[in-house]
Image (cartoon, helix red, strand yellow):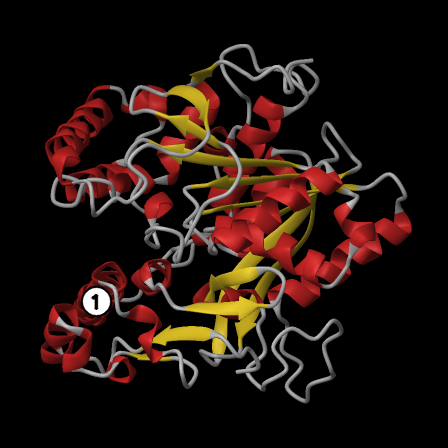
Amino acid sequence: MGSNDYLKLKPESATFLNLFLFTLSFNFVDIRTLADCPAGKERSYQSFGDRWIIVSSILLQKLLLAIANHLQTFKIIRAKIFGVPQETYGGKVKCGDWRIEVGKNNLKLGDDNGFRYYGGLTMMASTLAYESPSVIQTVVNNCWKMNLLKCYDFWNDFQGKPTTQAFAFQNTANDPNVIVVAFRGSSELGDWLVDFNVSWYNIEGIGHIHYGFMQALGLQNDGIDWPKELPSRPDNHQFAYYTLRQVLRDVVKANDKARFIITGHSLGGALATLFVTILAFHGESALLKRLQAVYTFGQPRAGDRNFAQFMNNLTKNYGFCYYRYVYSFDMVARVPFDFKNSWYKHFGECVYYNSCYKGKFLEAEPNPNYFFEILLIPRKYLTAWWELLRSLVIPPFKGEGFNTLMVRLFGLLLPGASAHLTQNYINSTRYGKIQLPLEIKP
């Protein structure tokens, strides 16, 4: 690793005895049994709060890994008994399921400087990013009457396989100069493992940034980390940051009025944010000047307070909008942990919607650390029951389906998990009511 400051957890090799002893006292066990860090940095994690965050992160990862292994076994058994499910083809798409109108009156693009329109469009694009390329092509070209540029499956140099998906399209229906890039979010438990991991990687002048997110975006596993121009590789693998940056460069050359919007749900929201971060790290001013907005939904934290300050300054310097949507008790939007000034921080305003889809602009989301607010546990369970009952009563109106209902049932066991559903964010952007700040109003 090229950075001289980092923390990389080792949940696979960490034993429960080591976790227990490390929690009780730093002197009982060396941190290197739980994590890798530079020589001389071992004693940077002596406080009980720091040790508890490390232990909690590893325990959560072990739990999710065990669940993922059992689910994989279940899938193998189901495939042997019932056969492999058929692929969903583009021809089976119902355009009514992918409507992008906002509210009852289908607000126009200029009604509020595009906030509601692009909030609705980017949320649907973030949801569409979870689908197969054939479905994405059908929805963008045939349902939305826009122009799909390409779907991508990007390589992760650390996992040795493609783990990052995204697609880009041109809003030819209403705003032809706008190109939208949508990153896929956490679609498997393996992605959730990344969300709960507090491992970080330092970029000088920017701050500590989530190590797993950096890997998914295109961090190089050969000691060069983030070269401004990627050296030629014999394997010809594509990496998210470098490929998408070139796409935007080509668009700028062809259209001097082009503007960009970057979006994503969950992990996809973190990647959308960090894509902009690395553009700034590489001094890509020509692209940053064309950046219109970043919309994220249920985004986990991506870096520390220095990173947050860097991104706040970046939005001011280049004048692009950053809208971070958080729905109710969404647990992913509240991880990794925010503790004192040494761990993870969100930046920018939060566009918050409660479980009744009533929105407001806040400096930060309520109860920022999901697992630490013990007094809120009863309220979280009551909200989970309300969301389940709502799903049973109004499925035709809110687009609730069987799969959504199953996740809401799971939310009775772990409230906040079902709050992360894309359907909640679709309903918030489409039906939610919110008082807009003066700078957004026309």
Quadrant of residue 51 within the rendered picture: bottom left
Numbered marks: total:
1
- Expressed as whole percent of the image width and height from the top left, the position of residue 414 reads 16, 45
Quadrant of residue 47 within the rendered picture: bottom left
> Considering only vertical position in the picture, is 268 above or below 295?
below
In-image side of 38 versus 239 (left or right): left
Report which residue position mark 1 lands on: 55
- Expressed as whole percent of the image width and height from the top left, the position of residue 249 reads 81, 57
* Residue closest to the far top: 105
Residue at position x 78%, y 43% in the image:
290
In-image side of 392 versus 397 (left or right): left
Residue at position x 66%, y 41% in the image:
315
Q: Nearer the viewer, residue 307 or 243?
A: 307
In-image side of 88 versus 389 (left or right): right
- Expressed as whole percent of the image width and height from the top left, the position of residue 83 reads 26, 66
One can see residue 186 in this view? yes
Quadrant of residue 145 within the rendered picture: top right
Q: Nearer the viewer, residue 323 or 159?
A: 323
Q: What's under tag 1, amino acid-wise?
A: Val
> Considering only vertical position in the picture, is 114 above or below 441?
below
